[in-house]
Amino acid sequence: MSILTLHELLEAGAHFGHQTNRWNPKMRPFIFGARNGIYIIDLQQTLARARGVYTQVAQMAAAGKVILFVGTKRQGQEVIQQEASRCGMPYVNHRWLGGTLTNFETVKKSIAKLKGIETMKEDGTYDLLQKKEVGRTEKLRAKLDRALGGVKNMSRLPDALFVVDTVRESIAVAEANKLRIPVIAMVDTNSDPTKVQIPIPANDDAVRAIQLVTRLIADAVLAGNPNAAELLGIEPEPVDIAATALAATEPVVESPAAAPGLLPGNEA
């Protein structure tokens, strides 16, 4: 089963890290080298971890687990919404509200308010409101939908988070850690991989790299949970957990060193 290829990662620029003076030393094990003052991520590790993550996420989905997709940076907002929606999982793609996890009971009250307003629009109650009241209510609905629209159907805490950019989403990661909710995350060379349970080393600033990894997670959910696929009217992809796990242990023959233009400079 071909989950992800070195060529796709290279084409997406997944190997480009940050400038060498803007790195986190804890990322050293995931760095291949440096070129022109930019750290190069070891895509062999990216591939191996992507294969393993695919298997783990498929198994979680098969067990009915909920994975919350989190990515509020401009480059990832659209793909986070699209891929999470495609696989029927909740998401946060605008500002993370502090307490989304650690104060979830309060957040649920705001979600109930949002759903109440949506019901008013559907059952015609809006027609009974005065014009000014409609304006105020619609403004509140838009505000709540922007903040909570992606989690309005999340009735309980998620079983795991998938995060794009752990530096930007540090509050979300901290809340998950506090509640011992596992975090799967794209980690760039400025990230702290010790704060997440399942790091995937990759450029978290490139749109195409974000698309590749986020799509991988969504595909794994659909592969492991046929019910979610049927709910969305999508033909589920059969997943062979054993075969995928075996593939994750196979050595990756290709190496960034063999790719044109990726000759390392200073080693990390």
Image (cartoon, rainbow, N blue to C red):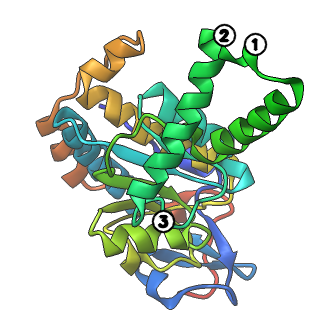
Left or right: residue 124 versus residue 83 is right
Q: Which residue is mark 3?
A: 99
Of labels 3 and 2, the one closer to you: 2
Amino acid under disc 1: Asp
- Tell which residue pokes out farthest to the left in this image: 242
- Quadrant in which the N terminus is drawn: top left
User: Residue at point 42% right, 29% down?
Assistant: 87
Q: CA distance from mark 3 to mark 2?
A: 33 Å
Amino acid under disc 3: Gly
Left or right: residue 215 versus residue 240 is right
Left or right: residue 78 versus residue 240 is right
- Residue 124's label in the rendered image is 2
Secondary structure state at the residue bearing disc 2: loop
Which of the pair 126/178 is nearer the observer? Answer: 126
Pointers 3 and 2 in contact (C-beta within 8 Å):
no
- Residue 75's label in the rendered image is none
Q: Is there any visible trace of residue 6 in the rendered image?
A: no
User: Residue at point 49% right, 36% down?
Assistant: 84
The spot of residue 135 in percent (x, y) is: 84, 32
The spot of residue 85 in percent (x, y) is: 50, 29
Amino acid under disc 2: Gly
Q: Which residue is mark 1?
A: 127
Pointers 1 and 2 in contact (C-beta within 8 Å):
yes
Image position of 26 with respect to 142: above or below: below
Secondary structure state at the residue bearing disc 1: helix
User: Residue at point 37% right, 51% down?
Assistant: 50
Image position of 147 with respect to 97: above or below: above
Left or right: residue 6 versus residue 266 is left
Which of the pair 262/13 is nearer the observer? Answer: 13
